[in-house]
Amino acid sequence: MNAYPELSPSPRTIMTPGPVEVDPRVLRAMSYPILGQFDPEFTTLMNNTMAMLRELFQTGNQWAYPVDGTSRSGIEAVLTGLIEPGDRVLVPIYGRFGHLLVEIAERCGAEVSIIERPWGEVFDPQEVIDAIHREKPKLVAMVHGETSTGRLQPLADIGRACREADVLLAVDAVATIGGVPVESDAWFLDAVIGGTQKCLSVPSGMSPITYNERAERKILARKRVERGLRSGDADEIGTTGFRIQSNYLDLSQLQDYWSPARLNHHTEMTSMLYGLHEGLRILLAEGLAARFARHRLHEEALVVGLKAMELVLYGDPSCKLPVVTCVAIPDGIDGESVRSMLLHRFGIEIASSFGPLKGRIWRIGTMGYSCSRKNVLHTLGAFEAVLARHGLKLPAGEAVQAALDVYDRHGVPV
Amino acid sequence: MNAYPELSPSPRTIMTPGPVEVDPRVLRAMSYPILGQFDPEFTTLMNNTMAMLRELFQTGNQWAYPVDGTSRSGIEAVLTGLIEPGDRVLVPIYGRFGHLLVEIAERCGAEVSIIERPWGEVFDPQEVIDAIHREKPKLVAMVHGETSTGRLQPLADIGRACREADVLLAVDAVATIGGVPVESDAWFLDAVIGGTQKCLSVPSGMSPITYNERAERKILARKRVERGLRSGDADEIGTTGFRIQSNYLDLSQLQDYWSPARLNHHTEMTSMLYGLHEGLRILLAEGLAARFARHRLHEEALVVGLKAMELVLYGDPSCKLPVVTCVAIPDGIDGESVRSMLLHRFGIEIASSFGPLKGRIWRIGTMGYSCSRKNVLHTLGAFEAVLARHGLKLPAGEAVQAALDVYDRHGVPV
């Protein structure tokens, strides 16, 4: 009668840099019956979600809400709102997702200047600041945590320099938000883009963003009220900038929808919002400081375990991203065969890599709900077994013992 | 400890033109643990979803997949892929969502010609065909079912005329897909956009689309491989058209992601895809013909009941959209007060309206899972009680009896 089999996903231990395992309380929330988008109960949920996002982004900004799409929809919404054709934009690149910022900025009509660091490193902030003074961009767009290389870029000094030079700074914090401190106001970030499917442990599908009044001024100068909702010609004239080229990702319209005016735009994603709302409640109940410490602890246990296997970590350790650990694939080992055996025999997923690192490193995530003692210990044990099965000589049994030592030392309950 | 209350949405009978109630089996599917996006189990689900979408769209097209956003993301993805700056585009408008097509087409740089019918009517196909011959557009974009006015536009003759004139035809079938026949191939539709939150009864969050080889040729002529994924300069050159202005909604990239190559783009929305997959399974198990007949039956019962209350329906009955029924608000009755009492006392949501119809009509949806005998009978009984409470004189008790008569006549089991 029905040729398509019933959904029955196998259980997985997901140790990639995203998407990662979803907290079961979030999954439960997503299975609740829906409310209409203008139901007062639903608009209350929208407002509470905005309030919780302000805490997550550590900001006093009025605007903090999700864009209805995956993380790159949030990036594109911010860039297409802040970049007018011909604007000079500076993108410091130190991995794959810097290239994505260039890609999107170019499609917005920007004149993009690039500075690059070799993959595995990040920028000395002064290098970016010098480029700002040299290139005089209207906007700097850069990545906070590069999952492609497992690096973390310090931003506070760059933020201060941008503010002093009256340059806007937009930051891709998709990989870091909820797992590593992102201090939007203290670091002078004008716009920040987060993701749901990494350290928040909500399924992919929304991109929480925040932006301040400096960014909002640029957006409002380009505002048009949508045809069919206009109250008169006045809504169309009196603007100074180029019209925003997307309707779906137009922040001037999205903020009207998220404002008390609730000006109709899209139909808000009810079940995704339920999930984000619950994910944020869980995050705030844990507390930001405790959550960041948890990510540090399990990273330490994982790293110590990998080193006990005599594996070599990739990249400059001084700028390691706590939530992604990159491991050099040992000579003579087929990285994809290792990943495949981990997935099909042990139900554990780790990631491969992109571009110049393809075939050279594995990437192991410790994010959100996946960032747990259980998962780290299972992964180390399975990884050792699979590497041994592939003929790698390693000190048998050491990895898990080393990780257990870390947990014992930190006094985590047995 | 946590200032934000636990999620606990009140039960609702949702009789709007969307979002409507979600089938509990879909909600259950959305609560399953996630798989990684390149997990073979997940890519199998993606392929099965494409196969089911082909059946839904009644097409042999290779490309049928969801865009990861709400319905208007699908509309924008299709238009931004098919429209190059300077292209002539014809938009026949007979309600609010025709204006949205103009809005988006203009942001794509189109030179838009408009023809309009008064709200409450649709076009005689010959009127559109004459405009095609006069305006010689590259693309015609139009709405199949207008929820703002509750009208259904016949498309087969327009499709044939477009094909003969070698004009592309893109159709917004967001309101009709899964509730009313949409025959993509038989009607010569080059691109069709659907929605999830209406007759499919899946939460808002994805927009299933399909397009044929004629549309694909236009898209591929504009293709660029993303920076950071390129294998060489060759990926960037050799194209003829203007680059597609969105990265997130770039169909040339999305189809690579949905192809066996699985070229990395966004992170697919796992839980939304689970929901869509289950919604499509339920739809195909019911069968398209049976599903369309169900929507006709409950529309009939609703309409007969409303007329038995001596209410007046809005719009030309010859082109009524089966899944939306528009009711003129009687003189002296406050439409918003009626809606509010229905929601707060009876837990039933019906819709208000837009633009010139604001305050003049209510809109009652009978879509997907909400389109049931239970819901129609509850709504008629509650509506009568609320109108009486607002002082309207009407034949008490007749509405529900008239609807029961319809069900008895059709032999629906008691």
Image (tube, coloured by chain):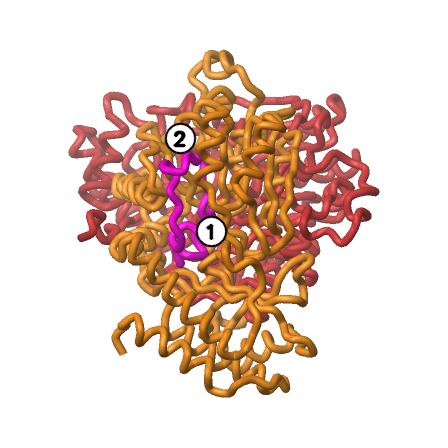
Chain colours: A orange, B red
Across and down, in percent, residue A405 comes to 36, 78
Count the numbered circles shown.
2
Nearer to us: label 1 or label 2: 2
Q: Chain of mark 1?
A: A
Predominant secondary structure, magenta span: loop
> Residue A218: where, in percent of width, then height?
48, 24
Does any portion of residue B253 appear in the rendered image? yes
Q: Quadrant of residue A407?
A: bottom left
Relative depth, front residue between B15 and A11: A11
Measuring 42% from the left and 17% from the top, which residue is drawn there? A231
Residue A3 visible in this rendered orientation of the protein: no
Provide the residue designation for mark 2: A212
Q: Is residue A126 magenta?
A: no
User: Circle 1: is it few (<14), some (14-19), or many (20+) Cα within 10 Å?
Assistant: many
Whether residue B90 sits left or right of residue A368 in the image: it is right
Amino acid at circle 2: Asn
Name the mark on residue A385. Answer: none
For the magenta stretch, what is the residue range?
A: A173-202
* Magenta stretch: includes residue A192: yes
Of labels 1 and 2, earlier in sequence is 1
Residue type, label 1: Gly
Which residue is at 26% across, 35% downward?
A: B339
Looking at the picture, does residue B217 appear above or below residue A165?
below
Q: Secondary structure at mark 1?
A: loop
Secondary structure at badge 2 equals: loop
Q: Position of residue B338 (x, y in %)?
A: 24, 33
Q: What residue is rendered at 74% in x and 31% in y?
A: B138
Q: Quadrant of residue A201?
A: bottom left
Horizontal side of B202 relative to A81 (left or right) equals left
Give me the chain letter of mark 2: A
In the picture of the structure, the residue carrying the numbered disc 1 is: A205
